Amino acid sequence: MLNLFIRCIIIYFFLLIAMRLMGKRQLGELQPFEFAITIVAAELACIPMSDPTIPLIYGIIPIFTLFLMHILINKIAVKSVKFRRILNGKPSVVIFQGNILCDTLKDLDMTTNDLLEALRCAGYFTPGEVGCAVVETNGTLTVMPKAANRPVTCSDLNINCADSCMPVTVIVEGRFLEDNLKHNDCKIEKQDIMQLLENLGLSQKDVFLLLLSGENVFLQPYQGSAINRSIKEAEQ
């Protein structure tokens, strides 16, 4: 029993490392060949896990082989557009200039309900709001709304807006991530954050989440309401 327990742990961590090295895509974003490799790798891992008479190496070598195949296929796909198209297919336009392309839906084996569901997932509840929609190679639907249905932007209103800053996580569940401050555009130091907490009557352990985006701060304490404003305003 102990032997089987240890074998499961070894195979699990080896499979975890192999899948981690293959990339960061979510299951729904996998290309067909990546999905096939994932299924086969999981099946191969189960064999030595469940049968102690099978040598552990019989599970590790096939998984390692699949990992090498994944790397090789990706390298070829990067260099060859034709191979990439054969491997992954190409995107298909299903709505063009506000019109649903019924023949394309039929070629993709998509029903009307499938299309409407995908549109709702994209935030559009009627095809009348959509100017163009594309089914990507991983099966997701990308939607370009009609001009009348798209969100208003600063350029539409002729307003000059400052560029957005990437939010930086500074405190998570009471833990201070000091290294992340190096990526803050305003070069705010740790003492500035601690001074802010002191002015708000909080300690580091009282903070569930603190994000910095330029000079703006989002602070969610464990107790009380969230603060979402500039650091200077938060200090007042």
Image (tube, rainbow, N blue to C red):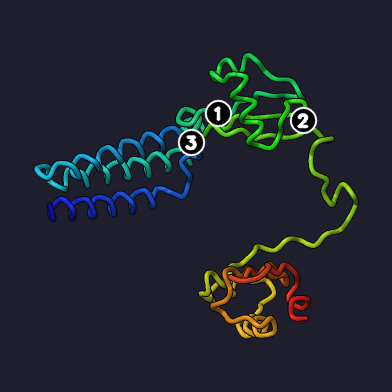
CA separation in Å, label 2 and label 1:
25 Å
Q: What element carries label 2?
A: helix
Question: Residue 80: which disc?
Answer: 3
Q: Are marks 3 and 2 in contact (CB under 8 Å)?
A: no
Q: Pointer 2: what residue?
A: 129
Q: Select label 3 or label 1 by which is in front.
A: 1
- 228 relative to 206, above or below: above
CA separation in Å, label 3 and label 1:
14 Å
CA separation in Å, label 3 and label 2:
37 Å
Task: Pinpoint residue 221: horizontal percent, then vertical percent.
Answer: 61, 71
Query: In this view of the protein, which residue sits in the foreground, 121 or 17?
Result: 121
The disc, 3 or 1, on the residue closer to the chain's N-terminal end is 3
The disc, 2 or 1, on the residue closer to the chain's N-terminal end is 1
The kind of residue on which mark 2 rests is Glu
Task: Specify the farthest residue to the left.
Answer: 53
Q: Pointer 1: what residue?
A: 90
Task: Specify the farthest residue to the right.
Answer: 158
Task: Pinpoint residue 12: horizontal percent, then vertical percent.
Answer: 28, 51
> For this view, does 52 lie left or right of residue 17?
left
